[in-house]
Amino acid sequence: MYDVLIVGGGVIGLSLAWDLARHGQSVGVIDRGQPGREASWAGAGILPAVNRATAIHPYDQLGGLSSELHPEWAGELKSITGIDTGYRCCGGLYLARTPGEAAALAAWADDQAGQGVNVQKVVREELADIEPGLRGSSDSVSGTQYSVLSTKYSALPKKGTGVFSLGPHVAVYLPDEAQLRNPRHLQALIAACSLTGVQISANVAAADIAIAGNEIREIATATGPLRARRYCFTAGAWTGQLLARLGVPVAILPLRGQMVMFCCPEGAAPIRHIINEGSRYIVPRDDGRVLGGSTEEEVGFDKRTTEDAIADLAAFARTLVPALADAPIERSWAGLRPASFDGLPYLGPLPGLSNAYIAAGHFRSGLFLSPATAVVMSQLLRGEPGQIDFAPFRVGR
């Protein structure tokens, strides 16, 4: 009999298990496959900059709390497990090529600056000084006149003054954007969970869920029934299928994201910063590898890569970063991001069940939001006052 049984061993489930165990809870985690090998492993580990002090919506509060927790968790995980998760504040550049993209980027940058995030605009001549790897780019990034202002945006006028309409094309620099190496972070979480007494079971699927009154009584598996005082479902894109057995409709859709990884010669990445353009990005690692991603495809539970998508991602990266032209593609892969219908995750109690909870549907932000999700869900499961309002994340919203 566990205090909490977590169904799903991705970054959300593992983070929650670690936080619960650190607060004296007995915790079990089961995963239908290998823990930490689905969407959590497949992403690029981008950590946006969010200012918790100015966050109003609970989703932004989660982001702000995560921004504070990530460096703390990285240090603690390295201290107790010896695993360097690859956390580093490398900064991120956001690019726009068309007037429409520039308008959207300007509005987003305006909003970020209004929340106290350090946002800088970059003129074309300064772009290559910030990121030399973009020098010689064959597309509009180097050829278009970026009519923008270079300054710390916190000193500019407030939202609505039209500051970001200085020109048709925009480049924005966020020096506080950071990154993690997903596989290492997950390895560290698994090790930390084991060190704190969490029992992690791989290749154990929930075959059936037995209900007695308004409680889950046990979860049947191929290795026998598992019982706990409370249950939390954190199975990512597969959570909806699990909860359908309970008659609880949860609109979580798997969206495939394909990725490509270059291996640069001499272990030196040709860029220093994360490069973002719309939903695509290029992320440099310290060992010379460079990630390019990502697609968003509604193809069900199909994790296969496609030649066209990988070729498109490679061309995107090589167009922006000419030094990647001769860098071989070391590997490519795909993951299934758990997307909700409105972009918000499902967090909190499951309706009609007094001992069942959910934490799923984070889409592309699972790794980023994982520490804050773990903290607030751990508080809820332990009966403590929470730090956020769960209403926007409730099932049936």
Image: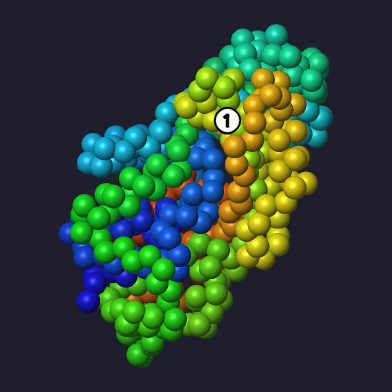
User: How did the renderer colour the structure?
Assistant: rainbow
Query: In this picture, is 379 found above or below 203?
Result: above
Query: In this picture, is 68 found above or below 360?
Result: above
Q: Residue at the spot x=25%, y=42% of the render?
A: 81
Query: In this picture, is 349 found above or below 185?
Result: below
Q: Residue at the spot x=43%, y=60% of the render?
A: 34
Q: Residue at the spot x=59%, y=57% of the render?
A: 336
> In the drawing, does residue 155 fall left or right of residue 314?
left
> In the drawing, does residue 7 fall left or right of residue 330?
left
Please name whichever residue, 264 or 379, is drawn nearer the observer in this view of the structure: 264
Secondary structure found at label 1: strand
Q: Quadrant of the N terminus?
A: bottom left
Q: Say few, some or many: other residues with alpha carbon within 10 Å of mark 1 (under 14 / 14 to 19 / 20 or more).
A: many
Query: Residue 139, image x and y in percent?
Result: 80, 23
Q: Quadrant of residue 354?
A: bottom left
Please name whichever residue, 244 or 151, is drawn nearer the observer in this view of the structure: 244
Query: In this picture, is 45 found above or below 30?
Result: above
Question: What residue is shown with label 1?
Answer: 263
Asked whether the viewer can see residue 257, the reply is yes
Query: Residue 169, image x and y in percent?
Result: 77, 23
Three-letter amino acid code at disc 1? Answer: Cys
**Residue furthest bottom in the image:** 213
Please name whichever residue, 326 or 280, is drawn nearer the observer in this view of the structure: 326
Q: Quadrant of residue 283?
A: top right
Query: Residue 306, image x and y in percent?
Result: 72, 51
Asked whether the viewer can see residue 63, the reply is no
Q: Quadrant of residue 29?
A: bottom left
